[in-house]
């Protein structure tokens, strides 16, 4: 499958993902940290000094927060052709999906709080398929996502079964 | 017989439903009372009575009110169901959305002449409407009405089609006024009209389903034979629940074994663990074999499959009689199943995957439970032309290694921890060669082929599947490569269809990289060409026929994946064909004669 002019996602998508991972890391680190504080005065012998686990969580979290959004962004690409939507993504599992436009059942554009800050949106393409029924294109410029939705709308068929 | 006009006013369920619901609630009461019944001391009798009274005060009125609240009728083109005591529910089910009407008769309702009607609509995970219970006659009438309505509507659609052949879009846009609104006169007019046009399937067959020639009837002997190829582990559950139910004391059981009449046998067995082990295995095998026969017999007794218009009908069951309908155009993937024993004797089983969700069968409908290959294929011809390919392309042999490694890792993960506790477990490593054999068999049984308008995927060692995915039912095409696969230059390819299961689904695992890409490209461009051809043709039918089908009937599997690759490279930019939406699009470069012939014919049909 070779397509020229594959599109990349909006660069701000990286920031959104990073912030999400940072929040997740903070939550986990706070949880682990709280546990370690309760253990400060326990008499049991400690193998590691207090705070080790929190530090480990923070370091791993920082790595994930930086690496995963960068890698994910690097491998995410898509293109909208006359008859199909083609997506390629995945860090470990590299997946290529061809969604024939005639198979579209309905379309959604969604935006969460973070995405709103960056004026980004997700395009969600629903098909009648079962295992990959919803194809999501994240990190699009919101106006553009709506534009895609309107372009694709014409393809929604009455009966795609 | 009840006629349509009877259904325009709200109707309630069969009165004996009350009895059934009452009987059904009894197990709950028994459970409630179980402790006191078993102990049975005098003081607790009062408690039992209190419970029984409470039960009578709460449950029985609830059953009655629920019965009284339940109303259903047919209105215009909808079936309306009102139900619920505390939460009231009003449900309108458009008749043209009903995929499937199942009539089911469990043993007791069957004795009382009642049936359960389930109305399935597309995309629902459970039955949308359930009438529990109506008389059997009424169930059949409902089914007839729905079917006649759908048929009349279809006729209208096809009339509109022949009127102005303007392709799919125009057809979809044309106002699909459900021709004869479901008023009694309208319906009769509709059917009369249908009879006039003299379309073969127009004359409705009523409850006399039996009159149409069956595609398959299974005599009891064949059902038993079918059961003989199936193993069921249900007996374990049965044994467990039996011991629970009978309150068998394990000590008593041991007593019986070691001091009672079985003592001699018991001591012999105890002295030889090998004998003991093989005896257990043997007993389990025999029991599972017998339960396999039994459950199959109960389920598939009197199996009958017949075609009615464009719908498959089937009926089976010894105690619970099940009747089901499968609209042919809702059929997605065809699945041929077997196991090594069955395959050895040439037996297969055909399942259909449909959009309507059937809870009992994980979205699959068994239409031919057990038949010889040729018989099955000739039945399948009524559903869809199905030419099983003679040869399948293999996936990359590296898959043997990958599976061997995977199985071995799994075995080690079990054996090593177990061996820490019980050193005999190390013997489990003796299984490693068998894992190798299994991995090889996996490779041998995995393959794919494309013939014309179908993609065939074969997989499975013990449970063997052959998926036949029709081109016009494919939804999403996918290629996937895990980090390990990428290192070895492999890819997996899968095609998603509506209603496919999550346990066994069509996926080609570990194809060589280039072949996977080429196949994906080929499938997708064929898919697009098929629909383009169909659009030009303005074909109303969902089934493969006419030039659109011929355009893809290459008739034989492609020579090999590399040939597929060259094809694909010719069609690399499939969109170009679409640019001029003219029907005179250049013939795609696949040099197969049937296409070359088919193309002009499709042109001539559009020019008319």
Image (spheres, helix red, strand yellow):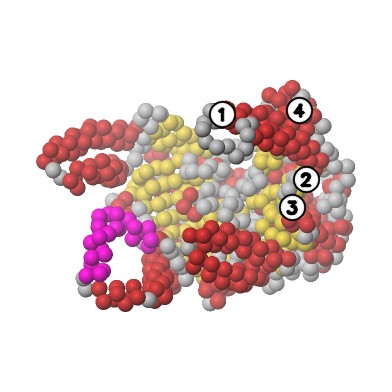
Labels 3 and 1 in the same subunit: no
Q: Is residue B387 visible?
A: no
* C-alpha separation, residue under disc 3 versus residue under disc 1: 42 Å
Q: Residues within 10 Å of mark 1 (few under 14, many from 20)?
A: few
What residue span does the magenta drawing correspond to? B235-259
Labels 4 and 1 in the same subunit: yes
* C-alpha separation, residue under disc 2 versus residue under disc 3: 15 Å
Of the pair A86 and A94, the residue shown nearer to us:
A94
Q: Which residue is mark 1?
A: A40
Circles 2 and 3: CB distance less than 8 Å?
A: no
Q: Which residue is mark 4?
A: A120
x then y, percent, for residue B415? 54, 62
- Say whether disc 2 or disc 1 marks the residue closer to the N-terminus: 1
Above or below, B546 against A96 in this view is below
Q: Secondary structure at mark 2?
A: strand
* C-alpha separation, residue under disc 3 versus residue under disc 4: 30 Å
Q: Which residue is mark 3?
A: B483
Q: Which residue is mark 2?
A: A88
x then y, percent, for residue B93? 50, 37
When asked about the image quadrant of residue A90, the answer is: top right
Subunit ID for the residue under disc 3: B
Nearest to the eye among marks 3 and 4: give it: 3
Circles 3 and 4: CB distance less than 8 Å?
A: no
When asked about the image quadrant of residue B525, the answer is: bottom right
Above or below, B325 against B95 in this view is below
């Amino acid at each position: 499958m070779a397509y020229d002019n594959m599109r990349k996602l909006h660069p701000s998508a990286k920031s959104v993902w990073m912030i999400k991972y940072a929040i997740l890391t903070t939550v986990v680190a706070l949880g682990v940290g709280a546990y370690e504080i309760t253990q400060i005065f326990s008499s049991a012998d400690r193998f590691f000094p207090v705070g080790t686990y929190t530090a480990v969580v923070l370091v791993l979290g920082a790595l994930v927060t930086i690496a995963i959004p960068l890698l994910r962004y690097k491998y995410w690409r898509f293109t909208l052709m006359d008859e199909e939507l083609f997506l390629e993504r995945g860090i470990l599992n590299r997946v290529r999906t061809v969604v024939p436009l005639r198979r579209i059942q309905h379309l959604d554009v969604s935006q969460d709080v973070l995405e709103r800050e960056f004026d980004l949106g997700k395009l969600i393409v629903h098909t009648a398929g079962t295992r990959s029924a919803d194809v999501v294109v994240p990190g699009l410029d919101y106006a553009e996502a709506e534009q895609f939705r309107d372009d694709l709308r014409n393809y929604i068929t009455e009966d795609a079964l | 017989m009840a006629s349509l006009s009877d259904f325009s006013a709200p109707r309630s369920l069969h009165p004996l439903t009350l009895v059934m619901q009452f009987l059904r609630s009894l197990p709950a009461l028994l459970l409630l009372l179980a402790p006191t019944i078993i102990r049975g001391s005098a003081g607790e009798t009062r408690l039992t009575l209190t419970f029984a009274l409470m039960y009578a005060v709460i449950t029985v009125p609830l059953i009655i009110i629920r019965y009284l609240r339940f109303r259903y009728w047919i209105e215009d083109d909808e079936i309306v169901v009102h139900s619920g005591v505390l939460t009231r529910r009003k449900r309108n089910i458009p008749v043209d959305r009903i995929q499937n009407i199942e009539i089911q008769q469990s043993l007791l309702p069957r004795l009382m002449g009642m049936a359960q009607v389930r109305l399935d609509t597309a995309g629902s995970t459970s039955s949308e409407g359930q009438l529990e219970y109506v008389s059997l006659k009424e169930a059949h009438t409902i089914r007839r009405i729905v079917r006649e309505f759908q048929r009349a509507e279809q006729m209208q659609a096809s009339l509109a089609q022949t009127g102005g052949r303007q392709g799919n879009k125009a057809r979809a846009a044309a106002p699909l006024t459900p021709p004869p609104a479901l008023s009694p006169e309208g319906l009769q007019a509709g059917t009369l009209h249908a009879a006039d046009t003299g379309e073969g399937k127009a004359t409705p067959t009523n409850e006399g389903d039996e009159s149409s020639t069956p595609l398959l009837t299974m005599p009891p002997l064949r059902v038993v034979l079918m059961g003989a190829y199936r193993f069921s582990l249900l007996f374990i559950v049965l044994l467990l629940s039996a011991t629970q139910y009978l309150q068998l004391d394990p000590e008593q059981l041991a007593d019986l074994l070691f001091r009672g009449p079985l003592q001699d046998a018991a001591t012999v067995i105890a002295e030889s663990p090998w004998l003991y082990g093989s005896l257990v295995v043997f007993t389990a095998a025999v029991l599972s074999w017998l339960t396999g026969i039994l459950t199959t017999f109960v389920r598939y007794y009197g199996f009958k499959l017949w075609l009615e218009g464009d719908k498959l009908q089937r009926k089976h069951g010894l105690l619970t009689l099940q009747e089901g309908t499968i609209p042919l155009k809702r059929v997605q993937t065809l699945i041929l199943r077997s196991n090594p024993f069955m395959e050895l004797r040439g037996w297969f089983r055909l399942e259909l995957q449909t959009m309507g969700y059937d809870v009992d069968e994980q979205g699959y409908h068994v239409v031919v439970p057990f038949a010889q290959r040729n018989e099955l294929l000739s039945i399948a011809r009524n559903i869809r032309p199905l030419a099983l390919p003679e040869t399948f392309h293999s996936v990359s042999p590296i898959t043997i290694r990958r599976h061997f490694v995977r199985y071995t890792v799994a075995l080690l993960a079990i054996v090593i921890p177990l061996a820490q506790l019980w050193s005999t477990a190390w013997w489990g490593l003796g299984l490693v060669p068998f894992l190798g054999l299994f991995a090889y068999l996996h490779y041998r049984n995995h393959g794919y082929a494309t013939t014309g308008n179908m993609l065939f995927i074969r997989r499975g060692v013990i449970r063997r599947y052959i998926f036949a995915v029709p081109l016009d039912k494919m939804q999403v095409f996918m290629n996937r490569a895990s980090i390990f696969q990428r290192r070895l230059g492999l890819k997996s390819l899968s095609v998603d269809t509506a209603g496919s299961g999550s346990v066994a689904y069509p996926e080609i695992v570990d194809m060589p990289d280039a072949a996977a890409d080429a196949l994906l490209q080929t499938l997708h461009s064929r898919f697009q060409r098929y629909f383009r051809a169909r659009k030009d043709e303005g074909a109303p039918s969902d089934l493969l026929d006419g030039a659109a089908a011929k355009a893809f009937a290459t008739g034989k599997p492609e020579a090999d994946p590399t040939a597929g690759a060259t094809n694909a490279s010719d069609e690399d930019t499939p969109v170009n064909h679409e640019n001029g939406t003219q029907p005179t699009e250049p013939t795609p470069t696949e040099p197969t004669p049937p296409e070359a012939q088919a193309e002009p014919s499709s042109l001539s049909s559009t020019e008319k």
